[in-house]
Amino acid sequence: MYKRPRAHGFPSRETVRDELVKLISELGGTVLTRGRNSKNSVYELMADRLNLSFEARNSTTIEGENAWRAEVGFARKDLVEAGVLHPVQKAGRGRWKLVVGKED
């Protein structure tokens, strides 16, 4: 369920989390945070998937960070805490991996 846009023109955190899980699943259960070029990064794939505007993709936080990368990062953190994604210690640096079962 798509909810109304939030700050920076982003969809709800719930929508970002749901679409992130769908994307990782469609890509075989594991995704690298960076592709061979910036157009293949998980951040760009998610932005394309959610039809983010150029302005939303390039907006920054007060600290000067890319706000979209931070938003996707917070969604990932939520999914790790919920047990949906493996933590970096298990998945590896730069790799986001879905938890498949109890023994995964």
Image (tube, rainbow, N blue to C red):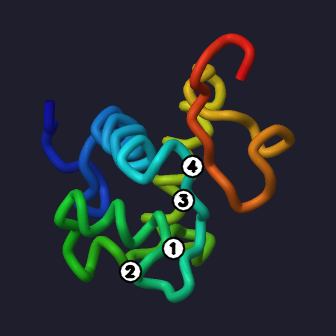
Residue assigned mark 4: 30
Q: Quadrant of the N terminus?
A: top left
Q: Which residue type carries mark 1?
A: Asn
Q: CA distance from mark 3 to mark 4?
A: 20 Å
For the residues bearing labels 1 and 3, Cβ distance under 8 angstroms: yes
Residue depicted at 33% across the width and 35% down the height: 18
Q: Which residue type carries mark 2?
A: Asn
Choose top left, top right, bottom left or bottom right for residue 32.
bottom right
Q: Position of residue 53 (x, y in %)?
A: 20, 74
Q: Earlier in the sequence, mark 1 or mark 2?
A: 2
For the residues bearing labels 1 and 2, Cβ distance under 8 angstroms: yes
Q: Which residue type carries mark 3?
A: Ala
Q: Nearer the viewer, mark 4 or mark 2?
A: 4
Q: Position of residue 29 (x, y in %)?
A: 51, 42
Q: In the image as oriented, which residue stretches furthest toward the top?
A: 102
Q: Secondary structure at mark 1?
A: loop
* Image side of residue 67 versus residue 101, left or right: left
**For residue 70, which numbered disc appears in the image?**
3
Q: Earlier in the sequence, mark 3 or mark 4?
A: 4
Q: CA distance from mark 3 to mark 2?
A: 11 Å
